[in-house]
Amino acid sequence: MFRLDGKVALVTGGSRGIGRACAVALGAQGATVLVNYVRGEAAAKEAVDAIVAAGGKAEIIGFDVASTAAVDAAVEDVVKRHGKIDVLVANAGIAIDGLLLRLKDEDVDKLVATNLRGAIMSARAVTKSMMRAKKGRIIFMSSIVGEMGNAGQTAYAATKAALIGAAKSIAREYASRNITVNCIAPGFIDTEMTDAIPAPAKEQMLKTIPLGRTGKAEEIAAACVYLASDEAAYVTGQVLGVNGGMHM
């Protein structure tokens, strides 16, 4: 169950954190994984090594999702070399926090370019291959803050909320081609991004989680594997929250 043998999966932002965990998990289920990175080439190579060590197949692929031209060129190259892309995990993202009155125009532009436009353009690029195959899986990495908001994260939350609307719209457009499009909305997950949160804020946040703990990147990866699998063929346009009950 949930095997991905023969599938080709592209994971953007796959060199660390949740993206790395997703890439490793997809590889463990038999997929050939393209681990995308922008600056962390060494970390991307480590992710590939982990996949290969577990008996999987993987390679690194460097490009910035904020550049539409780079996305199109990279996807075209992958399809040319591997013949297809079966799974896209649009995970690449950045976080720039700050109160609304201190929010800079350029910060909003950066967040939109990477978190939102990057995901949409990545989806647009892979659908060409998926339409020919008449099947495919697109998974957007949203966030719990896209569903419930969070003080100090107006622009970030807006990009993550927008991904949900985008996923539902693309799901409707391509359902007739057996291309499913879903979102995963992680809660408070142990990653480098959350490591930067001050201890008092973490303690306060833990009080809002019914399960009483933070999540693991591997728990997000498990949801990713499910949505990428044949067993999830009847699931599309959905938001899968993996948040310990923090948002219901």
Image (spheres, grey):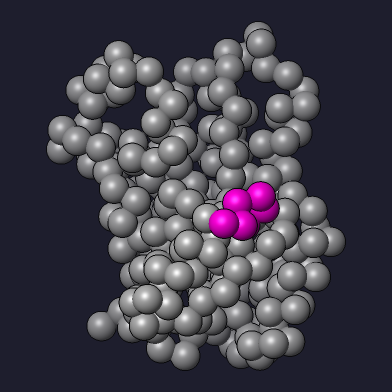
Q: Quadrant of residue 113?
A: top right
Which residue is at a point 39% across and 59% down the rendered structure image? 21
Of 211 and 15, the residue lying toward us: 15
Rendered location of residue 237, percent (x, y): 48, 61
Left or right of residue 52, residue 88 in this image: right
Residue 112 placement, left or right of 206? right
Residue at 49% of width from left, 47% of height from top? 142
> Residue 42 appears in which quarter of the rendering?
bottom right
Q: Residue furthest top?
A: 101
Asked whether the viewer can see residue 167, the reply is no
Q: Is residue 219 above or below residue 96?
A: below
Residue 41: in magenta span: yes
What segment carries the magenta color? 37-42
Picture quarter with the C terminus: top left
Residue plotted at (39% across, 31% down): 195
The quarter of the picture where the N terminus appears is bottom left
Question: So how many labels did they put on this image?
Answer: 0
Q: Is residue 229 covered in magenta?
A: no
Residue 77 versus residue 42 in the image, above or below: below
Whether residue 90 is situated above or below residue 78 in the rendered picture: above
**Image location (x, y in percent) of residue 3:** 33, 83
- Residue 117 at what x, y percent from top left? 71, 49
Q: Is residue 79 above or below residue 71?
A: below
Specify the quadrant of the image occupied by residue 156.
top right
Q: Is residue 45 left or right of residue 103?
A: left
Q: Position of residue 162 (x, y in %)?
A: 59, 43
